[in-house]
Amino acid sequence: MRYRSLGRTGLMVSELGLGCEYLEPQPWETFSAVIEQAMANGINIMDAFMPHPYARDMLGKVLIGKREKMILQTHVGAIMEGNQYKQSHNLEKSKKYINDFLVRCHTDYIDILMLHFVDTPKHRDEVYDGGLLEYAQELKRQGVARFIGMSSHDAVTSVEIVKTGILDVLMFSTNLAFDMMPAECELDNILFRDEAYDQQETFRIDPKRAELYRLCTQMGVGITAMKPLAAGRLLDAKRSPFRRALTVPQCVRYCLDRPGVASALVGVSNLRELEDLLSYLDSSEEKLDYSFIANAPKISADGSCMYCNHCLPCPTGINIGMVTKYYDLAVGIPKGSPVFEHYSRLEHHASECIACRACETRCPFHVPVVENMIKAKKMFGK
């Protein structure tokens, strides 16, 4: 394993990290095996986006006697309501979930306390005016939080807040699809040279995102990259906005080539996916090269569901990310496949959508959720 300095924090983090959103619902045997195998291979940072009490209990259990070997990011502003994840910048509810995290994880400190999901001026104002930032800073003064971070999908909002100097770490959605110039630009026409990237040749990145990477480097704000695989889309030629598939190592390499990025936090749900991630360490330069996408057609990541469920809560209880994921998996396969059975076991289905579109106002990727629910209802029959 190779390690990098996480900005000005002084922490040395593994280039490969764990994103645990997809690990959260797994049974204990899988959950524990993945984390133990990851640590055995030198992974020392994970994003503990785990609002569900069951997952927090498992995390605490697996880290008994090993807590100091794992750098934990956790989020203030991610809670559970009605057995659903909910984004909330409510101070009292957020305090409850931070205290719950400490108790269930058998720890008295959090390495990086993330201000959760700050994507818009409204989110920023909620964090500033609602007391969440002040609470995080107080936890840092008390030593309960070692460093303050923020998770975001939006470069403009992130640049504004990084400039204030309040952040030590930024968790930012980073991958080839998100970074590329808008869809009207042809990739094979936008290769360019830029010494600021400390590499001979690279791709032209959206200027707002390029500014963010450079600003973080200048200010010593370490970046942990989330969604390196774009929820698996980049691994599938049919679903990739490039219409060509990349490998996990190529996606990781792209993230680690961005200025300021110290670790790529890849979501895994089982040991096989962990092995795919660890294969990065033994990959040749040829296998890590992602420049072949320069000949790809026009791209656009906007409108693609990342299954992150930041669109929740749904007033009728639909797990929108899971419904959409099952739909994407079911496209083009026989109706007798297991995915149809998995969908049928969901507590709520696409047919329950009331088209209120509140989810669409919260989605950072502008996904047409209602349209997707209509498609899923037609696909699965309910």
Image (tube, grey):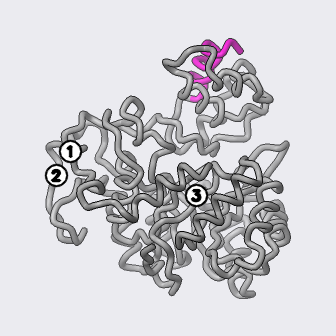
The disc placed on residue 19 is: 3
* Above or below 240: residue 105: below
The residue singled out by tag 2 in the image is: 191
Q: Nearer the viewer, residue 133 or 339?
A: 339
- Prevailing secondary structure class for the magenta stretch in the rendered image: helix
Residue range of the region highlighted in magenta in the rendering: 369-382
Crowdedness of circle 2 by 10 Å Cα count: few (<14), some, many (20+)?
Answer: some
Secondary structure type for disc 1: helix
Tell whether position 73 is magenta: no
Mark 2 vs 1, N-terminal side: 2
Marks 3 and 2 sit apart, C-alpha to C-alpha, by 31 Å
Residue 116 position in % (x across, y down): 64, 60
Residue 308 position in % (x across, y down): 60, 45
Quadrant position of the C terminus in the picture:
top right
3 or 2: mark nearer the eye: 3
Residue 355 position in % (x across, y down): 67, 23
The residue singled out by tag 1 in the image is: 294
Quadrant position of the N terminus in the picture:
bottom left
Residue 105 lies left or right of residue 364; in this view the side is right
Is disc 2 in contact with disc 1, using a CB cutoff of under 8 Å? yes
2 or 1: mark nearer the eye: 1
Q: Nearer the viewer, residue 231 or 140?
A: 231
Q: Residue at x 66, y 52 (%)?
A: 23
Is disc 1 in contact with disc 3, using a CB cutoff of under 8 Å? no
Residue 376 position in % (x across, y down): 61, 20
Q: Residue at x 53, y 45 (%)?
A: 364
Tell whether position 378 is magenta: yes
Mark 3 vs 2, N-terminal side: 3
Secondary structure type for disc 3: strand
Kind of residue at badge 3: Gly
